[in-house]
Amino acid sequence: MPTQKPTKKQREVLDFIKRFQKKHHYSPSLKEIAKHFGVSAPTIHQHVQALRKKGYVSAAKGEKRSVEAYEFGQSEIATIPLMGLIPAGGPIEAISNPEPIQVPKSMLSRTGRHYALEVRGRSMIEEGISDGDIVIIRDQPTVENGESAVAYLPEKNEVTLKKIYHEGDRIRLQPANKEMQSFYEKKVDIQGKVLGVIRKVK
């Protein structure tokens, strides 16, 4: 849910995204938003990232039409289980304590099972995932290189949240924090892909 009010310009960008989605039934590209406001795409990118951090839109890196405005009407809310804590630092044993949590439907895929986890640690801060945030996960056994995922390490019976890279017969688990080192595992079970983040209310 939103954690801060948008600025006047951010509100204008948000309203345009909502109108575009309603009219076309898909999201505008950064170039289309920029053209509407007569500014550069990098400028719009800054506004979109600010709106994402404040909880008003989702935006997937590298995808052309991934900017989607959340709708917060009751009909647009879904309930998924909050399964407990996920470490975003060094791997530690998972804690499972399911309880219901309400999230915008726009954060979920149209198909599949979804769940939420509360983040512990700072290893994913460069992906906009901070300690205390809630990550929305789609339950799936594979992800593409560079995607953030819940990874179970069977030899350690531990789980962690990292960016995944397949490198030959091993997998690199990469933090999104330049102060932390990646590590390698032979056996990794992917338990879900990160779809979005609900910022911790400060």
Image: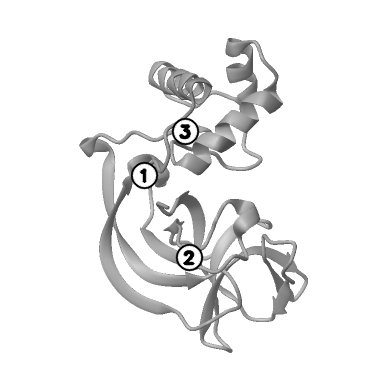
Of marks 2 and 3, which one's residue comes earlier in the chain?
Answer: 3
Question: Do we see residue 52 in this rendering?
Answer: yes
Of marks 3 and 1, which one's residue comes earlier in the chain?
Answer: 1
Where disc 1 sits, the SS reads: loop
Amino acid at circle 1? Met
Q: Indicate left or right for 193 with 69 as reference.
A: right
Q: Residue at x 51, y 65 (%)?
A: 141
Q: How crowded is mark 1: few (under 14 residues within 10 Å), some or many (20 or more)?
A: some
92 relative to 100, above or below: below
Q: Residue at x 51, y 87 (%)?
A: 157
Furthest toward the front, the residue is 202
**In front here: 67 or 44?**
44
Furthest toward the left, the residue is 74
Quarter of the image for the N terminus: give it. top left
**How far, Cα to Cα, is label 1 from label 2?**
16 Å
Which mark is nearer the camera, 2 or 3? 2
- Image quadrant assignment for residue 182: bottom right
Q: Indicate left or right for 16 with 99 as reference.
A: right
Q: Name the residue under label 2.
A: 119
Q: Name the residue under label 1.
A: 1
Q: Indicate left or right for 155 with 120 as reference.
A: right
**In front here: 110 or 37?**
37
Q: Name the residue under label 3.
A: 68
Of marks 1 and 2, which one's residue comes earlier in the chain?
Answer: 1
Furthest toward the right, the residue is 168
